[in-house]
Image (tube, rainbow, N blue to C red):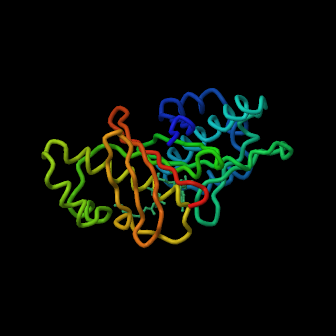
Amino acid sequence: MNFEAIQTCLVTPHQLRQMLESEPLESWLTKSERSRLRSLRSPKRRTDWLTSRLAAKQLLRDYLNQTQNILVKLNEIEIYNEASDAPAFNIIHHSRFSIVDVNISIAHSHGHGICALSEIEQVGYVGVDIEKIRPLSRGVLRKFLNKEEMIRLSRQPISDLCENAIAYWTIKEAALKSLRANQSISLRDLRVSFKESGESSVSVADRRLQLIARYWQWKDFAIAIAHRSAAA
Ligand SMILES: CC(C)(COP(=O)(O)OP(=O)(O)OC[C@H]1O[C@@H](n2cnc3c(N)ncnc32)[C@H](O)[C@@H]1OP(=O)(O)O)[C@@H](O)C(=O)NCCC(=O)NCCS
């Protein structure tokens, strides 16, 4: 499937700092976004929230510019969460532009924010995840790996264990987000099969659903994007 048609934007804490030093919040956040920011108490959550909003806004601005030749300012793009908490957006003052076919997904980790964007008709719904690569305890592994995956992982060289476990985790979280589900689905109910092509397929227990995912590493982070067709 066409991963090239999925666009991503990653914002680092350093890039956020530069933005905050050079631009007032009003120039890139809407009024309701600023009010949401004020409601966030934890500094870590604020940084994560800000980097992921900046990533989403830059991605949407560039997408609109490239595909529809429309120039919008960052504070004309509003990112909000639907009832399921899945992210969505509005382009303020530009309702005549039809971008209903686009969906976004957001993830954050250790002050880094990432957003992925896809056209629903062409690619389907997208999900993204980013995780810092780190050792995970057996207790954590049990929360997202099913029995077969635990066995498969235990047969692999111990040196690869940490990265392989994180690969499962990010792929499953990205796949889960592409479902945009209201109800909670256990990550253990998602089954990941790695393919030689580098892509993975993800199936969901009790559902006839097949998702495709791609996983890569960037510095000491693991990143995955997944998508499912709109018909699924
Ligand atoms: C929804 C979920 C995937 C988010 O993952 P997370 O690790 O908490 O956080 P991430 O940074 O990866 O992603 C957060 C973003 O996911 C998005 N999101 C939340 N709910 C969503 C949903 N139902 N569908 C799609 N996207 C969703 C939001 O945009 C959110 O960011 P925001 O609040 O700043 O807008 C997660 O909370 C979840 O339910 N995981 C499964 C639970 C589980 O089994 N965990 C075991 C692992 S040890």
Taking the image as shown, residue 36 lies to the left or right of residue 157, namely right
Percent x, y of residue 216: 37, 38
Residue 80's quadrant in the figure?
bottom right
Looking at the rendering, which quadrant does residue 77 occupy? top right
Looking at the picture, how far across and down is residue 108, in whole percent?
A: 47, 46
Relative horizontal placement of residue 116, taking residue 90 as reference (left or right):
left
On the rendered image, what quadrant is the C terminus found in? bottom right
Residue 89 against residue 182 in the figure, above or below = above
- The residue drawn where x is 13% and y is 53% is 155
Residue 185, image x, y percentages: 44, 69
Residue 196: image x %, image y %?
A: 31, 41
- Number of marks in the image? 0
Q: Which of the 4 image quadrants contains residue 75?
A: top right
> Which is more toward the observer, 121 or 55?
121
Q: Nearer the viewer, residue 44 or 125?
A: 125
Q: Is residue 48 above or below residue 8?
A: below
Q: Please give left or right for residue 132 compared with residue 180 in the image.
A: left
